[in-house]
Image (spheres, coloured by chain):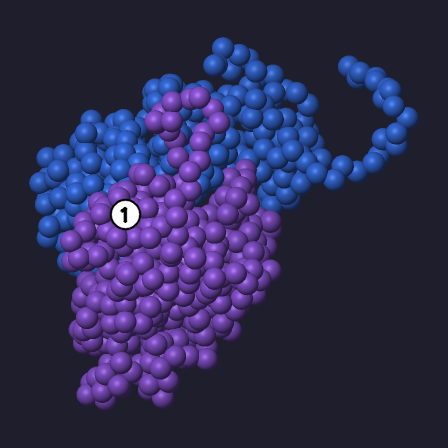
Chain colours: A purple, B blue
Amino acid sequence: MKKRVKLSSTLNPSLSFGYMKKYLLTPGPTPVPEDVRLAEAQPIIYHRTKEFLEIFEKISNDLKTVFKTKNIVLTFLSSGTGAMEGAVANTLSPGDKALCIKGGKFGERWAKICEAYGIEVVPLDVEWGDYAKPEEVKNLLEKEPDIKAVFATLCETSTGTLFPIEKYGPLIRQRAGTIFVVDAISGLTACDLQTDNWNVDICVSASQKGLMLPPGLAFVSISEKTWKFVDTSKCPKFYFDFKKQLKALKEKTPTPYTPGISLIRALDKSLSRIEKSGIDKVILRSEKLALAFREAAKTLGLEVFSKNPANAVTAIKVPQGLDGTRLEKILDEKYGVRVAEGQDHLKGKIIRIAHAGYIGKLDIIAAISALEFSLRDLGYPVRLGEGVKVVKELLKSLN
Amino acid sequence: MKKRVKLSSTLNPSLSFGYMKKYLLTPGPTPVPEDVRLAEAQPIIYHRTKEFLEIFEKISNDLKTVFKTKNIVLTFLSSGTGAMEGAVANTLSPGDKALCIKGGKFGERWAKICEAYGIEVVPLDVEWGDYAKPEEVKNLLEKEPDIKAVFATLCETSTGTLFPIEKYGPLIRQRAGTIFVVDAISGLTACDLQTDNWNVDICVSASQKGLMLPPGLAFVSISEKTWKFVDTSKCPKFYFDFKKQLKALKEKTPTPYTPGISLIRALDKSLSRIEKSGIDKVILRSEKLALAFREAAKTLGLEVFSKNPANAVTAIKVPQGLDGTRLEKILDEKYGVRVAEGQDHLKGKIIRIAHAGYIGKLDIIAAISALEFSLRDLGYPVRLGEGVKVVKELLKSLN
């Protein structure tokens, strides 16, 4: 059924349009809400004041709710990788053994950081797109009783895969000589993460994903058990020194070095957005958006890359014969929808679309619409609107 | 001569005022211009795009002009201390010997970082407020021929002291086995710093001082000579890895980890402000502001703490018998002028006022005015307006 319409103006319909409304759907940075951006843009204040201390203590406390922990949460001025490095350098010593669960660019990053510090890596290699079975973790832990830390990833951003942290955690709980460290950088607020219940000793996250901020803040929650590891660690550290950071927070300095003042005030604003909903509602929303997006993609004949898709980001396989880089370019340049390409060997083979943070159901409809258009532009058979229909059906009651 | 005036309204003249105009005069953060703050608040963009790459390459290039160098300038997402740590961890190995010129909190920080990395520190202890004589540096270098790096500070923020970098640099130039590393975090754009002419191998700076930005970006310029040290360094590093950062910049990635997108766009704006004046004019302005402030303070009977005052910040001795913490509090709470206290053993003994970045002559007049009022409140004999008169006289032709 083709609808015939006629423009009422007599302007040349082929005039080109010089600017375009943009939809950011990359899995980091994710869009930053207007009030959060304006909080970031406030006149700067001095950090050694009661005013700043109150904000810093409030965000340090509010983050506990988001992390689902009673543990202390430290805030660093860096991207997430800095805090990942801190988790290694503060707890281990050269020659120590660490189990690194891989399966993507970020799982591999744990191993690279460990290697940089002379830690002996016991790798648990997982095909990209898959996750590590808890039995595999269990077996490796039994085989290597001197493993001092297990490094895992909640949501592997490079493949859109959820790892069953809740299954790994209990395997480590009884081992006094082992801590469990989780990268929840892209997962936090999109995938459920129960730091304390799941026995996560160090949970690392960052600002530019589900927390709806620009990049620049990194967080670590640290269990009581972990501090004993910190006491004996012999790796050098300075900027990411956990003990110094904790001391400053306790002494209400509140940080040993100049903190990210503008970003912390923005964080205060975004955390109050999350608080208004409650963290579980925020997670559920991402789950529903992700589900609807995946179902719509399947309806278009597309395949989800991951064997255990995460809520934070969906990786879609680029159909056979199409160029993923081209698809991503058309989505951006012709339709204003910015998604992320595949990384490393997945470059050109997948595209990745975020569902975490300040992304609503109309953004998901926009993404699917643009995907329909773009695929058709590349000669892939699509019935326009078919994907959109699925999203609308699945999300009609989402608020 | 007392002027008598009468309020024309019949309102109660003792009504208290619930909010107050604030003047930020701390030596970091310094005020951020409105257009820079709005640049920071723009809708966030994805960093793996041509749009961001262009901005990143532009700022990387523009920073060279500010640093007065032809060397590469790398940008990290951290506060300045992170880049200081990078300068140590990327060039030295445990057991190496380094000369650390102290004389304040930040000179001492170099030594602390070196110690954290197992570097043997040859200290050049300088009384706080004084600077190291070039002969002392020369003697130590001759006495310890295996010193691999000399760490110095352009402007020691804790004391407001300028160190003669231009005298130290030539002492190191002929030594193939030694590099010269300078912390220009608070000095850059306020004190002259000729990285190449003065033989500075690594110059470290940060965003929240003379560059008129919030905290969050740290910079290092790296000489050709330095890269040979980087090749042999055995200290562990990851987030602050110079080689990886350089590789990403060259491959136009443009950074190995998520960069400080919002701050980098703000930096682009502040650098164009500096470019409009030219870096030398910016430095001269700070010099004139600092000079006028110091002369005015002396007229009020106050003493400048430093034996070699820097343009970026002036430390004023709190007059005998007055409480510095109280003075700083009155300045802030009663007059809205936020200055910094002394640090460590200088707490309560000095106050520090910035002249770097987005601070103009009327701010200096405001600072002196508030100082006159506050001193009088504390019972110190001041003739109101005497300091202001000096500032106005000295700065009348400053534009």
Chain ID of residue with mark 1: A
Asked if B217 appears above or below B162 in the picture, the reply is: below
Q: Is residue B315 left or right of residue A118?
A: right
Q: Position of residue A399 (x, y in %)?
A: 56, 60
Q: Nearer the viewer, residue A282 or A353?
A: A353
Q: In the current view of this chain or complex, which residue is farthest to the top?
A: B397
The one of A249 and B62 positioned closer to us in this rendering: B62
Q: Position of residue A170 (x, y in %)?
A: 37, 85
Q: Nearer the viewer, residue B348 or B89?
A: B89
Residue B337 vs residue A27: left or right? right
Residue B349 x/y as whole percent: 54, 43
Q: Amino acid at mark 1?
A: Arg
The extreme right residue here reads B10
Q: Residue at x 49, y 10 (%)?
A: B397
Crowding at dot 1, Cα within 10 Å, few <14 / some 14-19 / many 20+, comes out as some
The structure residue drawn at horizontal position 63% and vertical position 39%, both measured from the top left corner, is B332
Give the residue at mark 1: A376
Depicted A2 relative to depicted A211: above or below: above
- Which residue occupies 24% across, 59% down? A317
**Which element is circle 1 on?**
helix
Residue B203, located in which quarter of the rendered image?
Answer: top left
**Residue at 10%, 53% in the rendered image:** B232
Above or below, B248 relative to A133 = above
Examine the rendering and report whether any part of residue B382 can be seen: yes
Total tally of numbered discs in the picture: 1
Locate residue B66, reporting x and y percent: 30, 28
